[in-house]
Amino acid sequence: MCPCHTPSITGETITKYRKLIKDPHTKDIWSLAFGKEFGNLAQGDEVTGTEGTNSVFVISHDDIKTIPSDRVVTFARIVVNFCPQKKDLNRVRITADGSLIDDPGELTTRTADLTTSKILWNSVLSTEGEKFMGIDISNFYLGTPMDPDHIVKQYNLGEKAKNGFVYLELRNAIYGLPQAGSLANKLIKEWLEPHGYREVPHTPGLWKHKTRPVQFSLVVDDFGVK
């Protein structure tokens, strides 16, 4: 088993990532994982074929002079994780540090708690003919060895970097933003309500269809459907 598969790296941050990409045994694996994540957030990764979400755009250091006064500059955190249950075992997440962001809006996300989920499961088990399934919305967020600098080349980061750092302009929510969960929850409501699905008023995270015998618990973008 190679060093990149050790559980000790799970959930660790940028310091561990820097060590992994300096190790000749793990460099290509984690550089590829980083490329997928950066491409996912930006305009795609040409090497892995990852489609971009246009959540971030690379800007030059000169561009920061034009940042509006009502915008906040924060920093990114790189988190590495080994997920044996996922198709991509070695995963990298680039998150925005939310400690510097002061959002005056509503940040609470209504999600199903464990009790709601257990009641829904029990309802399925105790009702003859009922079925249960889990749904996850991908990208609401194993490759081959390659040039580890492909993202640097694709996004021309060399010319836009200064002292080893680049600025990214956020145009859509990404992991780590305090308001990300609330915005995603609001968007799901806008998608589902026209199709007859409504959240139960006094049970956060429990949804029902107005005419069909379908109900589900919702935690951010993970559905447990009866």
Image (cartoon, grey):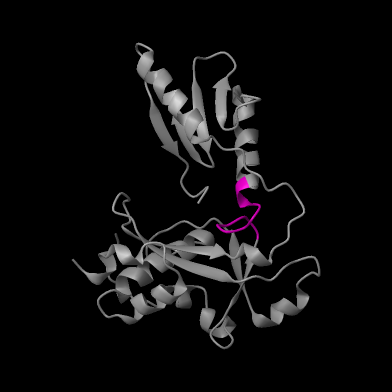
Does residue 131 appear anywhere in the picture?
A: yes
Of 206 and 209, nearer the camera is 206
Q: Quadrant of residue 88?
A: bottom left
Residue located farthest toward the right when viewing the structure as drawn: 69
Residue appearing at x 29%, y 74% in the figure: 26
| Relative to 130, residue 106 above or below | below
Residue located farthest toward the top when viewing the structure as drawn: 128
Residue located farthest toward the left when viewing the structure as drawn: 1
Residue appearing at x 60%, y 45% in the figure: 184
Tell me: 183 left or right of 88: right
Q: What count of labels does the image hold?
A: 0
| Relative to 162, residue 81 above or below | above
Verify whether residue 174 appears in magenta.
Answer: yes
Q: Quadrant of residue 207?
A: top right
Residue located farthest toward the front when viewing the structure as drawn: 115
Residue 98 x %, y %: 63, 62
Residue appearing at x 64%, y 45% in the figure: 182
Verify whether residue 62 appears in magenta.
Answer: no
Residue 31 x %, y %: 37, 72
Quarter the N terminus occupies? bottom left
Residue 81 x %, y %: 38, 61
Residue appearing at x 50%, y 29% in the figure: 116
Q: Main secondary structure of the magenta part?
A: loop
Tell me: 26 left or right of 76: left
Residue 76 x %, y %: 56, 69
Does residue 146 appear anywhere in the picture?
A: no
Quarter the C terminus occupies? top left
Q: Please provide the residue range marked out in magenta.
A: 171-181
Of 7 and 72, nearer the camera is 7
